[in-house]
Image: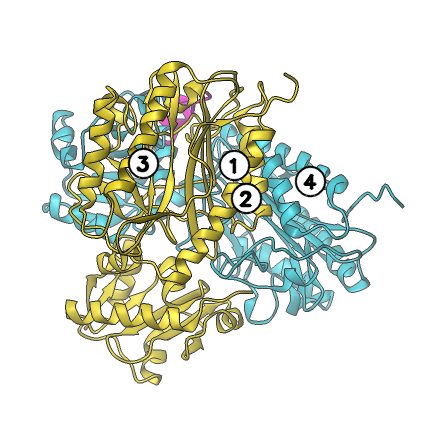
Chain colours: A yellow, B cyan
Amino acid sequence: METVPRDELDARIARLQETLDRQGLTGALILHNVGTYYFSGTIQTSFLFIPVQDEPLLMVLKSQERARRESSLDRVVPIPGRSAVASTLAEAGLSLEGTVGLEMDVLPASLLFWLQKTFPDCRWEDVSSGIRVQRMIKSDYEVAQIRRALEVEHEAFMDLTRFIREGMTELEVDSRLAMLARQGGHQGVVRMRGWNQEMTYAHVLSGESGTDASYLNSAHGGAGTCVAVPQGASPKKIQRNEPIEVDFSVGINGYLGDQSRTYVIGSLPDPLQKAHDCSFRILDRFRAIARPGVPCEAVFRAAVEEAEQAGLGANFMGYGPNQVRFVGHGIGLEIDEIPVLADGFKQPLEPNMVLAVEPKFVLPELGVVGLEDDYLVTQDGVERLSITKQEVLQVEEPDR
Amino acid sequence: METVPRDELDARIARLQETLDRQGLTGALILHNVGTYYFSGTIQTSFLFIPVQDEPLLMVLKSQERARRESSLDRVVPIPGRSAVASTLAEAGLSLEGTVGLEMDVLPASLLFWLQKTFPDCRWEDVSSGIRVQRMIKSDYEVAQIRRALEVEHEAFMDLTRFIREGMTELEVDSRLAMLARQGGHQGVVRMRGWNQEMTYAHVLSGESGTDASYLNSAHGGAGTCVAVPQGASPKKIQRNEPIEVDFSVGINGYLGDQSRTYVIGSLPDPLQKAHDCSFRILDRFRAIARPGVPCEAVFRAAVEEAEQAGLGANFMGYGPNQVRFVGHGIGLEIDEIPVLADGFKQPLEPNMVLAVEPKFVLPELGVVGLEDDYLVTQDGVERLSITKQEVLQVEEPDR
């Protein structure tokens, strides 16, 4: 099985150590599984200590032999339980002292209490912001994984133009995507960092389903199958001449692609086609203005401006109280990475950010239309990573 | 769409209020999505305050109109952001004061810091244990949802006896399950409470794949597709006469079924068949001894005894350092509920617990075999909720 190259890990650790030094921390204790994978190359249950200087120490609970196989770090040691963390650190000539960084945005409070009790002389500080900022910038290796995910998504997007039929339920289309994703090698899990946020691999929303907002921080929600997971595909049957929005995510080696396309059997009613045209123009404008140095909020404002010029300001990225205030976001190991292309986000674009840009429109009673495309910020602009064409995808109708 | 009956919510809230009273708490602030759903009937983004006396107040961020539609609570009010929590409570004649309960096992530290800063006069105490204990006992409504999930799983288990073919990859079988699950109405998400734990809907592990342990707290892991999600199905091709273990979970209205079956094309080698026979005997013994009042650890020890009598103590629930020390667990809104049928777990069985009992054996180089069946604890024993037969499921071979 492919493992994360050692030079990737070395570069990531060196970058974190710069952050630790700047923040006055003696080290970081990485406990969240995504962080463990990012810095060690394995996601096996572990305590990973990265000192501000010196080599990191990965202390593994389970599976120990698998962590050794997966991680190319030099110091990978088994521990029988978390009570052995202090002594294992000491044996390696390390200790938790001074102020140590933790990813407080995801760390459960009860685990923090345990750390406070176990290491009473230690102070703890949030280092999640530094780690998220670091992870904004993707290496060539990381971009290559996202490209692979987009290839799987492209094949599936094309498959649907031949698969969808009038009268089929959203769930049938969704289940086809599940199958194509896994057959294409999708890792099976779409990781989301936000508290209480969760995703399946896809949203398949036809007609009015697309107007159902949800607890998700996204332009669309969907009815879903039940109140317990009120998002995504439902038993609703797909009709002619209504938009079928498909938001689809696949993960390869942890890295997620995140794209959306609008399908139709027949043709879109005029207001929806005009909204889709506007999505297309927003992406055009994004490509024209996006380059290193341009603030994220400027990209968002340009998108809002295009939407307003088309008379669609109230429909942009949701409708009414359910509008979300962004037009795109970083993608990587998690689907909700920074930067966010949003008002107030002054962060300038930087080379090697990877962004999902998703201008979408919700029209009450009619549905949701729009595009989501993935881009790499280059030295002087952006490169489109998405393969699939941006037009509304016409469902083939062999019987007609 | 079906909603959670009001009398369900009333009973749950009354039971929590008893716990709050006993623990000396003035109320509980329910913030984790599963808790929100359990006590309010909606999972929309909210702050739910349940005072020790008085009606609960659900303050909804998004989606507000959907929360009103989904929850039958009397007091469902929109708030523009979390800064409005204090004033909204005050308007309802409520306040956060004294000691308030939080689910500290899942609450992110940064959110706790925000609460401490925003409500400086308040003390915070962990109430997660009381809530998990409460949720062990299922109502008839909850059991009915689990039964529905098991029906979907049964149809899919039977489908696989006709679908699996020699040379097919684990991922192809997995993707078939994904499709059948969604077509059967699976909610798309399998919720797991444990820190850093995550699940897809299924593990499909053939032959040696079944011996690959993982970061999951389970008897088997599987190779998976990549090091980022090292569990579940892989591109490995399925062979004749090797075990194909299928662990499968489906959620209906939030409630999860969790079952496993062993398949084979041809016949299992003798050591594997003997191990499977032992799984069968362990479930027999479970049904014979399990009744209210019997401690969980007694059930576990009886299982270990059966395994040891068969000379399979070292293979039971994993092999070597990857053995896990339980034979079953509660299921409900989360797949890793309590009680745990494990050593040291003195909790006696109680009527209306629902348990997934999963005696499994990992044989090095050969694979994993075993059963996972779901049971309801009744007044004087247990009722088997699983429909699917417990024998090794023979794959049909039309060409032979």
Q: Which residue is mark 4?
A: B157
For label 4, the SS is helix
Q: Nearer the viewer, residue A45 or A222?
A: A222
Circle on res. A181 = 2
- Do the residues indicated by labels 1 and 2 lie within the same chain of the protein? yes
Amino acid residing under circle 3: Leu
User: Residue at left 31%, top 26%?
Assistant: A278
Q: Are marks 3 and 4 in contact (CB under 8 Å)?
A: no
For label 3, the SS is helix
Q: Chain of mark 4?
A: B
For label 2, the SS is helix
Q: CA distance from mark 2 to mark 4?
A: 21 Å
User: How would you rate the neighbour count of disc 4 (Cα within 10 Å): few for under 14, some for 14-19, many for 20 or more?
Assistant: many
Q: CA distance from mark 2 to mark 3?
A: 26 Å
User: How would you rate the neighbour count of disc 1 (Cα within 10 Å): few for under 14, some for 14-19, many for 20 or more?
Assistant: many
Amino acid residing under circle 1: Phe
- Do the residues indicated by labels 1 and 4 lie within the same chain of the protein? no
Residues rendered magenta in the picture:
B1-12
Q: Which residue is mark 3?
A: A283
Q: Is residue B152 left or right of residue B138?
A: right
Between marks 2 and 4 in the image, the one whose residue lies nearer the viewer: 2
Q: Is residue A17 magenta?
A: no
Q: Are marks 2 and 4 in contact (CB under 8 Å)?
A: no
Q: Chain of mark 3?
A: A
Q: Chain of mark 2?
A: A
Q: Is residue A322 above or below residue B110?
A: above
